[in-house]
Image: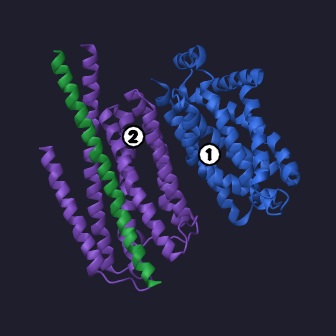
Amino acid sequence: MDDRNIQFMFWGLATAWGLLAIYVVMLAAREGRLRKQLESLKRMIEEKQ
Amino acid sequence: MTKNIRLGLGVLVGLLLLRNLYVILFNLPDEMEQGPIYRIFYYHLPAFFAAIVCYITALVASSLYLMKKNLRYDAIAMAATEVGLAFAAVNLITGMIWGRISWGIWWAWDARLTWALICWLVYFGYLMLRQAIDDPTERAKNSAVLSIFAFVSVAITYKAIEWWRTQHPGPVLSIRTGQQLIDPVMENMLYMNFLALATLAVLMVIIRLNQEEMQRQIDGLRRRAHAI
Amino acid sequence: MVFLQIAAKDLRSELRTKESLNASLSFAVVILLLFSFAFDPSSEAVAEFSGGLLWLVFAFAGALILNRSFARELPNDCLEVLIASPVSGAQLFLGKTIASFVLLLIIEVICLPIFGIFYDITWLPQALPLLGIFALGTWGMTVLGTLFSALTVNLSLRELMLPMLLYPLMLPALMAAMRLTTILLAGNAIGGGDIVWLRLLIGFDIIFTALSLALVETILVR
């Protein structure tokens, strides 16, 4: 029983960190995507002008 | 400038989180009845409060939007809701893992859990509604109204442990109960980790806001590109 | 009393075509039928969750009615005209809420005997208190549902978004109505500890009616 207790504690802390990490990764991915879009749009407008 | 602030805040939060994790794992004793599993509370409870703070921010920002019609407030409400959902998810899932050990089941259908889940679904619906509307002012207006309605469920969740008989543990913090129910060392640790998670939430909201600003720039540039 | 005219207008046009009334009534009966396959319909235990079953049916039928509430005005730009007319947003909202309320109550009153026959439930001795609970619960559902109907009327995913937003938020009323209906259908009177649920239901109705009336103007004006 004690084994499972400490195991689940580990999993609990891991999911707490993991979920926040997933959200951070989502944020970073969106940041990258937006930055790329912004760059390509700026380049496009410069070329057209 | 803002980039440096964000970086500084990020480093600070990272260090604080790691320090807290170290103390939680190695410096604090096991709880008498529950054993090691009680350590989940150091994330479960602070994540709940961080989510509540986010939802309150969303409520205030939404009301301000309806009064001032400034899209900046709408962006704040959206960012706070999204970050709040992330923390509420931490709260729900850590709670489930704790419940598996303490109650023997993953999900006890009691009032507190059910209401926390309802809150999550309601605010998820808020994000879905935002996605479905294209016009920025229309979206801001409608989602602000929904956010005000959604907050009712947060208030019920907060009060659920007093209104219904539940198997979820009652309030433990001395600022709410007026008594010292848990060891002050443990209570302090809860506050410390709340500080860490709340700062993390602020940082996330700032980053998300900045992204919204970028999105607006992109939309503007798109329109210009079409015009040329 | 403009809101009564709005309600009368909605009811009249609905009773003329009966499109959403027929659709949601037959939908409700189909769901009542489907439930009989989910569990043993002749068992005694049905009485213990009869209120829950009944309100699930009402909630499904209600979403159909409420979806039409504002969407009905979309063809020929009727909604724009209504908003531009001197009728205030609150009056328009109240009128539409009353219309949906009446329609849904009609469906509920038809469903109840069918439910009683299908699942061998006696409801006649408690008919009056039951009607009271139906009215309170339905008012809560329609007040919130009409507001969300206005909120989602311009969306392409309207049929999906409305129930998704409505069901979680109306849960307090639904919970209370389910509980009270179960008590009444089991042949007991509401009293003692169950008053809490009645209070929850009435409180829900008051809070959300006030909140909706205060906020509906901002939704409609564009």
Chain the render paints blue: C
Label 2, secondary structure: give it.
helix
Q: Is residue C134 above or below residue C79?
A: below
Rounded to the nearest whole Å, what is the CA distance between mark 2 and mark 1? 22 Å
Where does residue C111 sit, x and y in percent of width and height?
80, 42
What's the colour of chain A in the image? green
User: What is the image's colouring?
Assistant: by chain
Q: Chain of mark 2?
A: B
Q: Is residue C39 above or below residue C153?
A: below
Q: Which residue is mark 2?
A: B63
Q: Amino acid at mark 1?
A: Asp
In which quadrant of the rendered view does residue C77 lie?
A: top right
Q: Is circle 2 on the same chain as circle 1?
A: no
Q: Residue at x 60, y 34 (%)?
A: C146
Where does residue C28 sit, x and y in percent of width and height?
75, 40
Q: Amino acid at mark 2?
A: Ser
The tag on residue B168 is none
Q: Residue at x 35, y 47 (%)?
A: B80
Q: Residue furthest bottom?
A: B32
Q: Which residue is mark 1?
A: C205
In which quadrant of the rendered view does residue A34 lie?
A: top left
Crowding at dot 1, Cα within 10 Å, few <14 / some 14-19 / many 20+, comes out as many
What's the colour of chain B in the image? purple
Asked whether residue A24 is in view, the answer is yes
Q: Which of the two residues, B196 or C201, is positioned nearer the viewer here?
A: B196
Asked whether residue B178 is in view, the answer is no
Left-right relation of C135 to A40: right
